[in-house]
Amino acid sequence: TSKFSPSTECSSVSSSSSDSSSTDSSSAAELDVSNPSTSNSSSTQKWDYADNYSAEADFTWMANEEPHRSRRTEILRKYPEIKTLYGHEWRTRYMVAATVVLQTGLAATLVTTSWPLFLTVIYLVGATANHSLFLAIHEWSHNLGFKKPFHNQIASAFANLPIGVPYSASFKPYHMDHHRNQGVHGLDTDIPHPIEANIIQNRIYFKVLYMLTQLVFYALRPTIIKPLKPTRMMAFNLTLQLTYDASLVYCFGINALLYLLISTVVCGSFHPTAGHFLSEHLEVVRGIETYSYYGPLNYVTYNVGYHNEHHDFPFVPWSRLPDVKRIAAEYYDPLPVCESWVGIIWMYVTDPKLGAYSRVKRMERVSATERVNPNDEVGDKTATMNEGELKGGKKVN
């Protein structure tokens, strides 16, 4: 497997069965990104590291379609049995319920503890738990917890509670556009706004500030790029969240809510789990826009590290993504992977070759009529910001 790790140059290594060997990025072979899924995993694959920043820094603009749609079609042609992995994961609801109870209980019991213990528990437990809830909401945004989209939305609002800020209802339509239109200008709000990128660029102090306030950018950026019209589900999400927050303060005091809010801020900052925000799509290798991570932090993040597999098959639940990699190993083993979420945070902040412009963008958009999950009803209105396009919804191949 071709890997990247926190260093000032890209490692160029052979497949997982071979020994790793470093090489200077300037001597790496020309990278063919037209169809990376067809790379031969038995041979040494060399990758070009990201370009140096210049005064005219810009995103990497691609004319071709995002890689996941074509790779999914190719994999399904060869391994149709992957379709048996589609469906819902019933265990997620119980894991979420346990996490919500844990966080509520800790918020109630830590109100009188010392600040050193308070902050230690936040970093080790609270931030990890809240990040896990973020990713449970991500899982349910794909309708992978319950058969009806509405039930996934209601459950997401429940998972949202320890996060302290209403978020689940507005996340889903933005995230669906991220999948349908990965990298598309004006639609994929996962990518920094041009003004944001121009300010941050590759400046270390701005990258540190960005990491400290990363969730603020994720919250505000979509409202600037593509504002949403208010919906009943957003109103429900807001009302439920305010009721929970007020009840917590009334019963246990302001420190109980403070525990949850600080946990949320920390989980998106310099915390190991926050590395997935960078590792998923940061253009470390030239022209490669999605990366997987197969390390132990997947155990507390619903396997979100299996990100190439997830984008290829967003209707496979977290528990079966390792099966996708196992079945179609020759498509995933040759791809560059992130070895460490902690390492990618360090790499992003300290490496002058990486910055806010280190993302792949394109202009061509995809219709919003595609279904989130082939097992779902046609016309899931919770999954699109373009409800007028829902007529004649089609299945994903």
Image: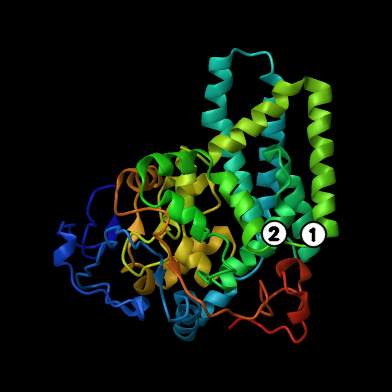
Q: Which residue is mark 2?
A: 145
Q: Is there a contact, CB below 8 Å, between mark 2 and mark 1? A: yes
Residues at marks 2 and 1, CA–CA distance in whole angstroms: 8 Å
Q: Residues within 10 Å of mark 2 (few under 14, many from 20)?
A: many
Q: Closer to the N terminus: mark 2 or mark 1?
A: 2
Residue 174 seen in render = yes
Above-or-below relation of 193 to 98: below
Above-or-below relation of 118 to 185: above
Quadrant including the C terminus: bottom right
Q: Residues within 10 Å of mark 1 (few under 14, many from 20)?
A: some
Image-quadrant location for residue 133: top right
Residue 142 seen in render = no
Helix or strand or loop: what does disc 1 sit on?
Answer: helix
**Residue farthest to the front, as pictured:** 55
Residue at image point 49% right, 44% down: 274
Image spot of residue 94 (x, y percent): 70, 46
Residue 205: numbered disc: none
Quadrant including the N terminus: bottom left
Disc 1 marks a residue whose amino acid type is: His
Image spot of residue 149 (x, y percent): 76, 65
Helix or strand or loop: what does disc 2 sit on?
Answer: loop
Count of numbered circles on the image: 2
Residue at image point 76% right, 72% down: 380
Residue at image point 45% right, 79% down: 71
Image spot of residue 62 (x, y percent): 41, 76
22 lies left or right of 361 = left
Residue at image point 72% right, 31% down: 104
Foreground residue among 197 and 275: 197
Residue 151: numbered disc: 1
Image spot of residue 292 (x, y percent): 42, 59
